[in-house]
Amino acid sequence: MVALQEKVSHFTHLQCSQCDKVYPADEVISYASCERCGKNPLCTMYDHLEGITPADIDSKERSMWRYFSLLPVFDRKNIVSLGEGFTPILPLERLAKKLDVEHLFLKDESLNPTGSFKARGMSMAISKAKELGISRCIVPTAGNAGGAMSAYCAKAGIQALVVMPEHTPEVFKKECLLYGAELVLERGLISDCAKRVVQINKDLSYFDISTLKEPYRLEGKKTMGYEIAEQMEWNLPDVILYPTGGGTGLIGMWKAFREMIEMGWITTRLPRMIAVQAENCQPIVETWLGNQKDSKSYVGKATFANGLAVPNPFGEQMILKVLTESNGKPVSVSEMEITTNMREIAQCEGLLVAPEGAALWGALKKLVAENFISRDEKILLLNTGSGYKYLENLA
Ligand SMILES: *Cc1c(COP(=O)(O)O)cnc(C)c1O
Ligand SMILES: [Zn+2]
């Protein structure tokens, strides 16, 4: 347990995202969601944000930990870092010309440890796990989260168990094993892996790092929002396209923007947030269109973009709220488009992005064609991972 006098972060408590019930900051929350209103994610809350300025950014630290004062780790000695975050924002000049748009950028998360932005969430989650004295972690994954958790657990000396769909490309399985994790393969999608995790963890001997059932991964993803603002000199893009599975990146960036408004760091209008999904698994699109009340019984299919194969996102209400508040919306892209998009980005820009990231380009074309995005707007594609891990599935 962390002694409060060691506290250097502004983290004060956790709070339910739906009913506002408060939970203490220094306890292991093992029930994985709000116990009062049922299954709703908990959010990390801070006090005295208004006193923090951009001068508090640790500008010598070239990782996401430069925002330490806005993160939930109390003691720096508990940070488990492999150099995650602080990724570049690249102009996509040739693609912009092709589509006839003026300002097109890509934040390249493929450069993170283990090749995806999952590193941010896992660096944060495993740092907090270390701070809370946890020795065993478990996670259901569509691929990248498993590798990232395994790597950070290795670094922290924490035991890791990963449950992954058996159809996932070999690279995703091998990296977990190389990092020393135990790997369980499951038939089906991440939702089936999640059920298996509950089964394996009946006695709660593992700490469950599932998306949004563990509150701190979100805080790691939040750092993308801070970086975008800082790198764009506090003038946010007009639109951000984000490949949405469980939605932590989308929710995390929005949380960062809200915190920066509270601190007075940004005063301009916030970006419209676009949740991009694969047609094979598009629960958010279906709910948005009113084809279902929610995603709880949505049945999805596997997709080349593994990370988007999340049929029943636990944080659905939070995702929908971001889309509504930002005047954004969800869009989906077919398997064929994703493959074509991946090649097009590689050939025009020299970037081998993950299929999830490639889907953003297909979505952008649609949104420009229907005038949802105009040609003079500042557009940011958030590429979440590296294409190298998926090549086995590329025909
Ligand atoms: C996990 C993942 C996603 C989806 O992220 P969420 O936070 O679950 O929405 C997108 N792209 C890649 C490469 C991923 O690994
Ligand atoms: Zn609640």
Image (tube, helix red, strand yellow):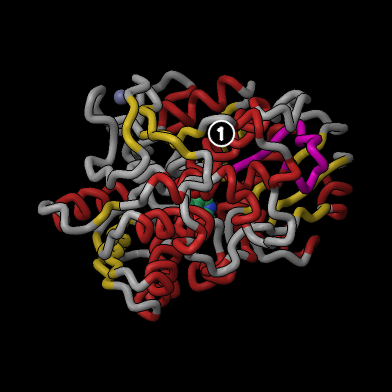
Which range is magenta? Answer: 229-242
Q: Is residue 234 magenta?
A: yes
- Residue 17: x and y in percent read 40, 27
Please indicate whether residue 192 sits to the left or right of residue 254 in the image: left
- Residue 16: x and y in percent read 36, 28
Asked if residue 375 shows in the view, the reply is yes
Please indicate whether residue 132 sits to the left or right of residue 236 in the image: left
Instruction: Relative to 46, say whether 384 is above or below.
Output: below
Instruction: Name the quarter showing ligand 2.
Output: top left
Residues 42 and 307: in front is 42
Instruction: Relative to 301, say whether 165 is above or below.
Output: below
Task: Name the residue furthest bottom.
Answer: 178
The residue that mark 1 highlights is 255
- Residue 338: x and y in percent read 59, 52
Q: Is residue 250 magenta?
A: no
Residues 60 and 233: in front is 60
State the residue at coordinates (36%, 61%): 130
Task: Name the residue furthest left.
Answer: 203
Q: Quadrant of residue 109?
A: bottom right
Please indicate whether residue 101 sits to the left or right of residue 134 in the image: right
Asked if residue 334 shows in the view, the reply is no
Q: Amino acid at mark 1?
A: Lys
State the residue at coordinates (52%, 47%): 8
Q: Quadrant of residue 184?
A: bottom left
Pick the quarter of the image with the C terminus: bottom right
